[in-house]
Each structure stands twice: as C-alpha cells, then as structure tokens.
Image: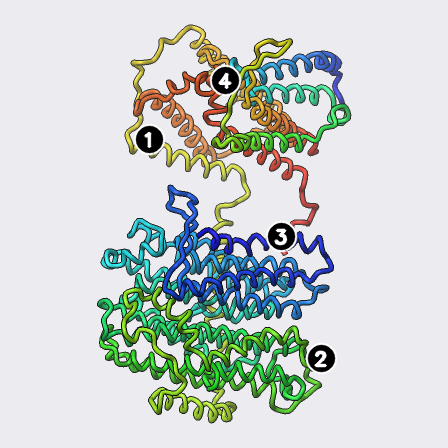
Amino acid sequence: MISIHAFILIPILTAFLIPFIGKQFPKWHLGWVTLAVPILLFSFFVSKIPVISANRTITGSIPWIRALDLHFAVYLDGLSLIFTLLIAGVGSLVVLYSIFYLSKEKESLSHFYAYLLLFMGAMLGVVLSDNLMVLYLFWELTSISSFLLIAFWFHRKKSRYGAQKSFLITVGGGIAMLVGFIMLQVMTATNSVQEIIAMRDSIQDHELFVPALVLILLGAFTKSAQFPFHIWLPDAMEAPTPVSAYLHSATMVKAGLFLVARFTPVFGGEATWFWLVSGVGIFTMFWGSFTAVRQNDLKALLAYSTISQLGLMMSLFGLGSAALQGGASIDSIIYTQAIFAALFHLVNHATFKGALFMVVGIVDHGVGTRDVRKLGGLLSLMPITFTLSVIGSFSMAGLPPFNGFLSKEMFFTAVLNAHEMSMFSMDTWGLLFPVIAWIGSIFTFIYSMFIVFRTFLRPYRRERLEKDPHEASIGMLLSPIILCTFVILLFFFPNLLSKYLLAPAMNGILPTYQNMEGFIPKISAWHGFNLELLMTAGVVILGIILMNTYRFWNVIYDLFPEKRSLDRGYQWLLAASESGSKKATDHYMTGFLPNYLYYIFGFLLLTVGGTLFLSGSIVFDPSNDAPVSLYEAIFVGIMGITAVGILFAKSRMTATLLNGVLGYSIAVFFVLFKAPDLALTQLVVETVTTVLFLLCFYHLPEWSKEDRSWKVRFPKIILSIGMGALTVLIALSVQGNNLFESISSYFEDSYELAGGRNIVNTILGDFRAFDTMLEVVVLFIAGIGVYTLVKLKAPQGGDKIERK
Amino acid sequence: MRENDLILQTVSKVAVFIILTFGVYLFLSGHHNPGGGFIGGLTLSSAFVLLYLAFDVESVNAGIPLNYKMVAAIGVLIAIFTGMGSLLFGRAFLSQSSAYFNLPVFGKTGFATVTLFESGIALGVVGVVITIMISISEDV
C-alpha cells in the first residue's frame, strides 16, 4: 500500500516547509502548525489497529534502484505499529508541550520544529522499512536530527559537546550495523528483512552469521545507550526538555530495542545473541539505576534511569530469544513471556518516563533550577505537578496501582524463569539474573522516590531558587496529565493493550509460536503470594531503609571516581585521535609544493608502472604501424629539440614559450593524422593556456639557478626520467596490446543514430553527453575555485578567527 | 610603464571580430563538420583574451559589462536543463533529437536539440576561461 510511504514522508516534507511558513506568518507559534502532523499520523496509524490485530500485515514497495536491490519497502506489523503509535502519540503530546515550553520570541522555532519533524519522519522510516539499506538510511537520519536537536542551544559549550558525543557514538555504532547488514546481504542475497527471516535456517551455519550478529548488536547497543556506550545519553540532556522526553526516552533510544526485536527471529536461539543481549542488558539495568541514585541534576537522574530501563527491556528481549533455541516447542513457550514483558514495558516506560520528563521541565521552567540540592517543598506551590510526579515515579518504582507494577512483576517472572533454563550453561550462571535484577530494582525504587521527596517535600528555601515557584499553565500540564491517565488506565485494562497491540507484535517477533496455547499471557494485577510479590515487597522495604540511610552509605560512590570513569576514557580517546591525526597530517602536509609533486608522481609511477610491469602489459609491436613520413620525422625532431631546450632555458618566459611550441607541434600532428577537430581544439587550448601561464608568472619570483646539491637533484632526476619513460611505455603498450575489438565502428553510424555527421561531436553531445555535461560542471567548479582562492582572501590575521 | 602597443591594438580591433565570427561559425558547424560547443566557446574566449591583452581590464570591462561568473553559471544550467527536456517526452536524460524544416530564406534547414546543449557548453567555457584570466591578472 502506497499510503504508508506517504505517511513516512509527510513529516520530512513538512520539515522543509516549516521555515517558509514561519517567514510567511510570523505571528503564528509554529508549534500549532507542527502539531497537525503527528495528530494526522496518529489517527492514521490508529485506523490500522483493526487490520493488524487481526494478525495481518501491510506491505508495500516502491522500486528505487533495482540493480542494487534497493526498494523503498515498508512492512507494518504489530511490532512496527506499537512504535508508530508511540512516535506519533508521544510526538503529538511533546509538540503540544513544547508550544508552552519554548517562547516564540526568544527561540528559533522554525529550526526546532523542522528538526523535530525530520526526526519524526526518520524514526517512522526506521520502524517501517523492510529494506536493510533504507532502514540504515533512516537510522542515520535519526542520529543526525538528534545531533541537531541536542545542539539546539548551540551557544552553550555543553550542548555542542553533548551533540558531538551522541553523534560520534551512535553513528559509529550505525556504521558497524551497516557492515552487519552487508554481511546479511552477502549471506542471503536479499535486502528484505522478511525474506532474511524466512531464510533463517539456511544461514545459521554460515561463517559470517556470528560477526553479522555482533555488528548489528553494536548498532543497537549504541543507539539504545547500553553499557559501555551509555555515556552519551546523560550529555544529550543538554537538549530542550521536550526533545529529551521525545527522543531520549520515548522513541529514538528505543530504536535499538526495535532492531533487536526485529532481528530476534533471525538471530534468536543463538548463544552469542542470548548472552550479549541479556547480559549487557541486565548489567546496564543495574549500572544505570546505581548511578542514577547519586545524580543531583533531575534530568541527569532521569537520563540514567532511562539507561537502566532500556537495559531492563534489552535483557528481556535477550532472555526471550531463548525460546527460539531448537525451534518452537511447548516446553520453551514459557520463555516467550519475557518478550511479552519487554513489549509491555516498552509502552509503559514511554508513558511514565515521558510524563516525568515533562514534570522536570515544568519544575525547571517554573523554578529556574533542576538541582535537587536547591529544590524542596514545592508540594504546596505546585500541587498538580506534584501529583503527576507521584504517578510517574511510583509507576517507575513498580508500585500499584500503576502500569509499571505490572511490567515489573512480569520482569521478575521472566528472570525467575530464566534462572531455571537448562540451555546456554544457564544452570551455572542463571542465578545471577534474578539477583542483579532485584538489586537494580532496589536502586530504581530509591531514585524514583528521590524525584518525589527531594523535589516536593523537605523544607522549602526560597533563597536558593532563581524564580518564584508557581504552578504551570494548563497547556504545559495537559500533556503529562494525558500520559499519567494512560499510566493508570493501563494498570486497570492491560489486556486491551495486549489484545490489540502486544499480541500481534508477539506474532511478528516469534512467528513460529503463533496460535500456540499460552503464547499470549493474561496480565493480572494479583497473582497470589508468589515469589515475584515477595521480591517487590523486599524492594520496597529495603528501598525505604536505604533511602533513609543514604548519607551513611553514599561513600560507596567514591569507589568510582570521576577520574577513571568511562567518560574520561571517551574524552581521552577523542583528544588522542585529534592530536594523533594532526601529527600524522603535519608530517606529510608540509605546505611545500615540490613535496606534493613527489607524492603525486611517485604514486603514479608506483601504481601505473607497477601494474604495467606485474601484468606483463609492456609490449612493443611495430608490425601494424604505418610507415613514418618525412613531415612526421621533421616534427618529431623539432619537438625533441624543444623539449631538451626547456631544460636549459634561462627564464620562465622562454620555458613557457618553448612549451607552447610543443603544444602547437602536437596540433600539427593532429592535422597530419587527419583529425581537424582535435587540431583546432589543441590550437586554441594551447593559445589560451600559454596566455594564462604567462599571467601566472607575473606573480612568481625570478627563476634563479640555485646551487643545489646532488642529494636534492638526484631524486628529482629519477622521478622525471621515470615519468617520461612511463608515458612512452604506456603509449607504446596501448598500440601493442589488442585486448578487445575497437568500438569505433559503432560511432560510424552517427548520422542514423544521432543525426550528425561529425562523429567527434555526436560523441560529445549525444552518445556521451553525460560526460560532457559533468565536464562543464567540473570546469565551472574549477573556475569558481580559482576565483574564490584569488579574490576572497582572508584579511591579515583573519585565519585565526576561523579556527576559533 | 606601459609599452607602446598601437599595432597590437589596431590589429586587435579588426581581428577580434574575425575571431568572434569564426567562433560562431565553428559553434554552428559542429553538427556535421569540425567544430562544436567546446571549440566554439574556446575560440570566442580567445577573442576576449586578445582584447584583454591589447587593452587594459578596466576599459574592456567598461565596453563589455558582463559578469563572467554568471555567464558560466548560466551555461552550466542550460547544459543541465536542456538535458532534462527529454524527460518530458519520456526519453532518457540528455537524449537529443533533430529534424529538418523548410524555412523561407534558408531553404531546408536542420535543427537539433544538441545545439541548445552545446550553447550551454560554449557559454560555460567562455565564462570560466575569462573568470580565471581576470581573477589572476587582477591579483596584484
């Protein structure tokens, strides 16, 4: 179906229009214009729910470059539908929120909304593409738009730093992923994800299977901020809060999870996949929550909490992939529950984390700081914001009656199930999963409580705040209120979500399990007194104790000093690569022209001469040559004398004129060989270039005979003789070798084919017109280049300004 | 210090027109005989070069007030857009065609779309050559 393509492109096209709309109607707040796009997208994708929940999929393909198997192919199944609804739904709320968050007077709104829409389209492209290369294209486009949005306040140094960091890490991972995709393409000879899934069994023993797996996971891990690549996400919080809520918690960072889910049917069941995804995920979950507790900036706290939650979902996808080991069977259906929990938590996380980010934005907006050491006692001043933060935080902590409780329980069930696994040597290591998960959950509980207690309770101290706190306007509160409503509604009616969205997504991820008994679990808030409930109770009790004794045990963080953090490692790597490349470049870029000529001619001599020599192409075969006539002999003699004469010329002028003699002699040769076109061209070109040469010499110093040592001259002589010999050898070998039939007979029909009798010109203007067109473009670029180099020189000392 | 170049200037005044006419002739005859857009363009620009050599840059610029960068840009655009013309007829990019018409004075005359394309090339060459020349010569 074509319409899905259109809906991917609508936001991207609107992004280009936004600046014009902003110019045309300067009185409008561009957010209202932008808001129409995600709402339109949302209603479109909602209208697709009945089709998808009936377990059908929508596909469509527009051919792009057929020879490269590049098709703009879309594939809408349950998994993509969840993501599209998140992108469009959270997108609408974020745009609405941003209208009140960003002031029309102070900010460059046309940039902001153009980038945001660009991201929206790119993200839709990622989750809807069925073609690997198109998927990659959109994947990198999300990185680029994220870069632009983080650096939105580009006058801040930290914004630029954060933007660069996120860009380097995510694009680095993206390139690894591209290599993985190419390996998949080599193995399967197709770019279509669905066709690759169908070929799963035939590629599993291929030697590239595991490398492809690892590389694709690198892409997913960098994008989803998994340990040790998580360091970019806290710095990305320099972006405006609506962006953080949208890109860096609800959608873009989940692209990695999407990739893992999408490729689970291909790689799932493989031990490397299982261990990497679940192991990295569970450790990230722990590390994120552990680090979040120590943060003083509310947004940094939320960033680490997002890292932790992403790790949680990642580990669930990993644990669930075990179900595919040895094919689908009723014994391993219990493991599929982990993937179900992951999908459920994916939706839940978007609701409560989105709400929390917006709440933090409101606090920041109303008070002027996000530092928890300064905040406190806002309860009576911002009652609605407080209520919203309670709903969000308690859901994140996993307390009833909020949706986070349900998915947290299912997470515990999944790790407990995993503990009983018998494959992948889980009998030895399996116990680690429930233990780490439980410890991580305690820290999650602590930081969730910190958000509420430190911000809204504790004594209120006005003197530490920059502004008088006040409740936010209804426009700003509307979006978090809607999200919080979902947080509560999903607790009471989780099975509606399960029936319409999660079940079709499960069928998409694990097609072999479709229609099996117990594949789609029923979500219920009350399971009886089981181990999961006890674990939650333990989390709450221990969490409260640790929270109240925080000042006694926070010394534990001193074990991880700033100096040896991963962040420092990144900075060191960046600085080292910069200085290293500068050193290497300075070594050969001397700014001394003769050196560059050495490189160019030396390289040419080595490659061309080497190829001629190694392939044995040096042939001298005069048997087919025409006899040498008297005129030719005379002109060869003239050219020889002139060429030698140049070497002994006393001034530049003489040398140039002698060089001109060589050029005109060549024109005479063209006449002798009956090529009037070439002769004419050569004559005019020679005239113009000689004039240009003479003009240039005006700027050069006098040609003085320097007393150079043999050490300087010898390499020059070698190179010159080598180049001359090479040229002669090539000319002779071209005559001597006859590898294929000449194609010139084709052009003899030029009058019938192109309507012109002049073969040379029909080749230039018709047969190979593309060459001619591009040549004139290149000529133009060269001309403009000369003009700018000569005319637009920086004033004295201006060079420094540019480097700043 | 300016040399006495009266002879050069006098000859140039006549020669420039001969060269320009020859350049136009080369440009038009290119379809069936030696010539074409590139050579035509180069010949035309050599006429300009001669002018600039015989007289100084200021007086030539006053006589021919052209922005040669624009000339070059227009030429390149003509070359690209005439190539797109064939797309309107469902043919591949840069396809050319030609036909004969009976005109009152000229009799049977051939017209070819390639002439338009070549005019773009010629303008591009003229513009670039003179831009480069003026840039370098003015850089003192």
Identify the mark nearer the N-term, 1 or 4. 1
Mark yes or no: residue A397 visible. Answer: yes
Q: CA distance from mark 3 to mark 1?
A: 55 Å
> Residue A329, relative to residue A68: is it above or below?
below
Q: Are marks 4 and 2 on the same chain?
A: yes
User: Looking at the image, which residue sits at the far top?
Assistant: A630
| Residue A467, label in figure | 2
Identify the mark nearer the N-term, 3 or 1. 3
Q: Chain of mark 4?
A: A
> Residue B101, relative to residue A259: is it above or below?
above
Provide the residue designation for mark 3: A17
| Badge 1 element | helix
Of badges 3 and 1, the one in the foreground is: 3
| Badge 4 element | helix
| Residue A612, label in figure | 1
Q: Chain of mark 2?
A: A
Question: Residue at position x 33%, y 69% from top?
Answer: A276
Q: Position of residue A557 (x, y in %)?
A: 47, 83
Q: CA distance from mark 4 to mark 2?
A: 80 Å
> Residue A333, relative to residue A15: is it above or below?
below
Q: Position of residue B118 (x, y in %)?
A: 56, 24
Mark 1 packing: few (<14 Cα in 10 Å), some, or many (20+)?
Answer: some
| The quadrant where residue A110 appears | bottom right
Q: Position of residue A176 (x, y in %)?
A: 39, 57
| Residue A678, label in figure | 4
Mark yes or no: residue A583 visible. Answer: no
